[in-house]
Amino acid sequence: EAQVTQNPRYLITVTGKKLTVTCSQNMNHEYMSWYRQDPGLGLRQIYYSMNVEVTDKGDVPEGYKVSRKEKRNFPLILESPSPNQTSLYFCASRLGNPTDTQYFGPGTRLTVL
Amino acid sequence: QKEVEQDPGPLSVPEGAIVSLNCTYSNSAFQYFMWYRQYSRKGPELLMYTYSSGNKEDGRFTAQVDKSSKYISLFIRDSQPSDSATYLCAMTRGSNYKLTFGKGTLLTVNP
C-alpha cells in the first residue's frame, strides 16, 4: 500500500530536549516536505527536499533541521524545542512536479512544555 | 500583504447548493494552483490542480484561475454532506520552489 508514515504520532516533551520526528515513504517519490498546521495560521511549509541531499527552506524553517540521506526518509529534527513549536506536523511526498498528487502522512501532534 | 489570502469561513450551506471557495494571491510568479481537501484529524488530499490561467472540471468540482486578477476559485456543484471539510488553496512557482497554502475554509454541508 502506497503511504507516508510518521513517528511518533503524539509526543509531549519539555523545552530544550532534542527530538526527531521520522518520515518515510514507499512510493519512490523525489519530493518530500514538512509542514506545520496551527489554528488561524493554516498549513505552513517548514522545509522541502527535491531529491537526496537537496533541501531548501520553506516559509517557517527557524528552529528546525532536516536531512535527506536516503530517498525514502526525511526526518525533522528539533535541536532545542520551544513551546512555540507546539503544533500538528505533517510530512508529505510526491513524485516531482507540483501537479503530481502529494501524499500526506497521518500527522504528529507535538506538545512542548 | 500575505502571499496567499483565503477566507477561513466557516461556510455553511444546504445539501445541493453550489459552493464557491476563493483565494487571492500577491506573487505574480505563481504558476501552479491547487486545491486540497482536509477532513477532520486527517492530512490534506489533493483535489484538483491548474497550471497557469483557465478552468478545469472534474465531476462536481471546477477550478478557475484568473492570473490577471490574482484570484483562484473552486466551485462545488450539488454539494453533499460528505463534502464537509476544510478546503485549502495552494500555489507555487514550480517544482523547485516552496508550496504556499492558504489558511483554509471550513465548509459544512447540511443534509
Image (tube, rainbow, N blue to C red):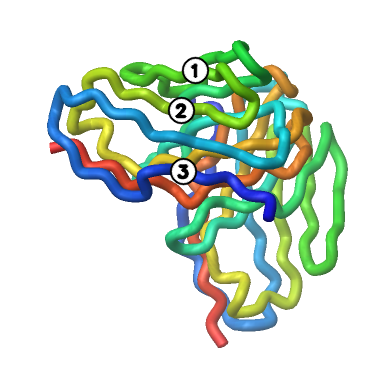
Judging from the image, mark 3 belongs to the subunit labelled A
Say the numbered circle drawn on residue B97: none
Give the alpha-carbon distance from disc 2 to disc 3, as whole Å. 9 Å
Q: Quadrant of the C terminus of chain A?
A: top left
Say the numbered circle drawn on residue A67: 1
Circle count: 3
Q: Residue at x 66, y 41 (%)?
A: A26
Q: Which residue is mark 2?
A: A75
Q: Which residue is mark 3?
A: A6
Determine which quarter of the picture holds residue A96: top right
Q: Secondary structure at mark 3?
A: strand
Q: Is residue B91 above or below residue A48?
A: below
Determine which quarter of the picture holds residue B65: top right
Crowding around mark 1 (Cα neighbors within 10 Å: few <14, some 14 to 19, many 20+) is: some
Judging from the image, mark 2 belongs to the subunit labelled A
- B28, A93: nearer the viewer: A93
As drawn, is A54 to the left or to the right of B60?
left
Q: Which amino acid type is marked by label 3?
A: Gln
Q: Quadrant of the N terminus of chain A?
A: bottom right
